[in-house]
Image (spheres, rainbow, N blue to C red):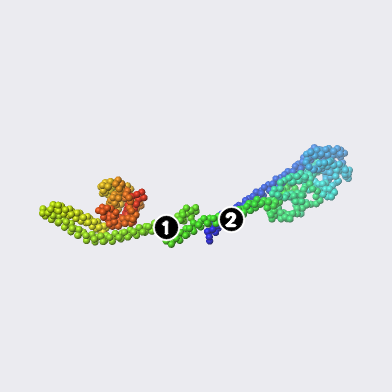
Amino acid sequence: MRIRTQIFIWVFLATVLPLTALTLGMTYTSQAAYQRDVDREILTHLEHLAGALSRQLAADQATALGIARAPAVQAALPALAAIADGQAPADFARQRNALNRYFSGFRTLLPGVFVLRLLDAQGNSLVKVTHSHVGKPLYESLGGLRYVEQEITDPAFVQALRELPPDEAGALHLPHNRNELNHAFLLRDAVVPLHQDGRFVGALALTRLGDQLDRLLDHTPRLYDGRLWLLESDPDQHPQGPTVLYADSGERRFAQLRAGTDYFRAPWAARWLDRLAAAPEGVWRDGERLVHYTTWLPWPSQLTEWHLLLRTDAAVIAAPFERIRWGIIVFAATALLLTLLLSALGARRIARPLNSLTARIKRFADGEHRQHVDAGQPIDEVRALADAFNYLSDTLQAAEAERDRAQHMALQSNKLASIGQMAAGIGHELNNPLNNILSYARLIERSLREAGNGLDAERLGQLREDLAALREETLRASQIVQGILNFARQVPPAYATIAVCPWLEKTLALVRQAARDRHVALELDCQAGELEGDPHQLQQALVNLLLNAIQASADGGSVRLSARTAGPRLIIEVRDTGSGIAADDLDRVFDPFFTTKAEGEGSGLGLSISLGIVERHGGSLRLGNHPEGGAVARLELPLKAGSES
């Protein structure tokens, strides 16, 4: 699978997909919480509206009860009692006029359409005052009393009047409100029974058409574009189901004459009634519609229930969240396209250095070990990979250099061993002739002293000079042979504990005179403790290094001897201020008899002997040039005998 596809899948699965799922999930969670808030808001709104309707009905009943308790009405109670006994009071016309005037005074107090009636014990209208006129007694009765409306022949209504609790306002449908076509208003009348000495003698009735309720309902806000219904349930009068009092659908209003009963026949009415039987208020879902409803008793003394319903479209409530979800989908699609684009760019940015690194690794495998890649990559992981490759290359090159150096040292050691064996043989062979030459030189010198008187003085002096030169050269050759024998002998170290700093000071004392002769300053920087080794052999090796440094330094220069510990090793450095070692001579400095000094100043065995001593101690000796000038000899020795350096 290509890296671009991998990056796309990773980014998509790690960011776009979970982010989209999370935001979509949050919208549904927020929508559910918002729906609960909407449900509470609508139900609270319906409860407030139900309270306003109940207060309006209670106000009408309180008004009817207050009028019934008024002195003008109470004064008519004896006349009503007489009428109940079948007697027509002589002064009833005067009382009727007084009540007409009293009732007419409510035109300024009761808003809208109203009808005030004073009924006798049979429910007939003795007094009738409306918002616009006063009723006249035009209808004769069998008892000789005139009524303002036709007589009522409804025993059930009369029985309902008698059953009303005393001194309370009840709710009844007055048959007086039906017209010739049997049309009537829906709102019940507020009726207060009147009693004289505990005897029912009549009633006071206040009729409101419901226009004030219509205005209240019409001006109520329809939350979330809902449609409002007000239903009435009365199992005694309408067992078929609730009737419609008010509805936005069909524009049903209280102040409308109805010829018959208008039952609630919505397509979802039956299912809602099942819900209503389980819970008197709440929220019911009808497909994509929501029905919020509440139930209460408008007249506490009766079993009649009113139901307020607000039906809303669930899509209206969910519309903001649907827009958000569409926005999320658009965002996800945009993010998908951007992910594809960024994956391609990112893959190119990653693949290019990786391809370059791959090519260099192949060349590295083919033997081109001097390979380096650009470590200045903007991506940390690619930069780390480049650094790792460069580190691998450098490490392998260093390992190769160390291997070559080790091979060179091994070759040098083998060469020294071979040369040592050869030198030992040559030394022994040369030592005897040299001793013989010295012996013969001494004999010749003795013979010259004995026979000197017979020779020419000038000739004698010349012979003596020649013999001295012969003896001097023979001694020099003997010293060279002795050095060869010492080089070849390779005596094992006699280990002892050495206090490094005092030992270095004694070693410097051995070469101090040579330094003074060449006007070279000696410096010591010792930060070491103890060392296990042969103090005499190591001192010989160190003296050779110091003498070489003194001879390489110019007049007025300096030689610095420093010592420090690094882990389990002791590091001693001898640095001079000379011209350094020529590049062509670096590989030959440890070869026996190789020297860059003038003839007669050195045999070329000092560094070879020093190298042998150091290696017998398990250490290493390296010569090189210091970056600031001059040569530096670095001697590393294990602090403990037998440990690795």
| Residue 56 at least partly seen | yes
- The residue indicated by pointer 1 is 370
Q: Quadrant of residue 493?
A: bottom left
The mark lying in front, picked from 1 and 2, is: 1
Amino acid residing under circle 1: Arg
Residue drawn at (77%, 53%) of the image:
263
Compared across the picture, whether 108 is left or right of 40 comes to right
Compared across the picture, whether 29 is left or right of 127 comes to left
Q: Which mark is residue 337?
A: 2
| Residue 11 at least partly seen | no
Question: Which numbered disc flags the more N-terminal residue, 1 or 2?
Answer: 2
Q: Quadrant of residue 91?
A: top right
Instruction: Measure the C-alpha gap from mark 1 to mark 2.
Output: 43 Å
Is 414 rendered above or below residue 548?
below
Amino acid residing under circle 2: Leu
Residue drawn at (31%, 59%) of the image:
412
Is 97 rendered above or below residue 251?
above
Q: How far from the left and from the top, in percent, is residue 642? A: 31, 56
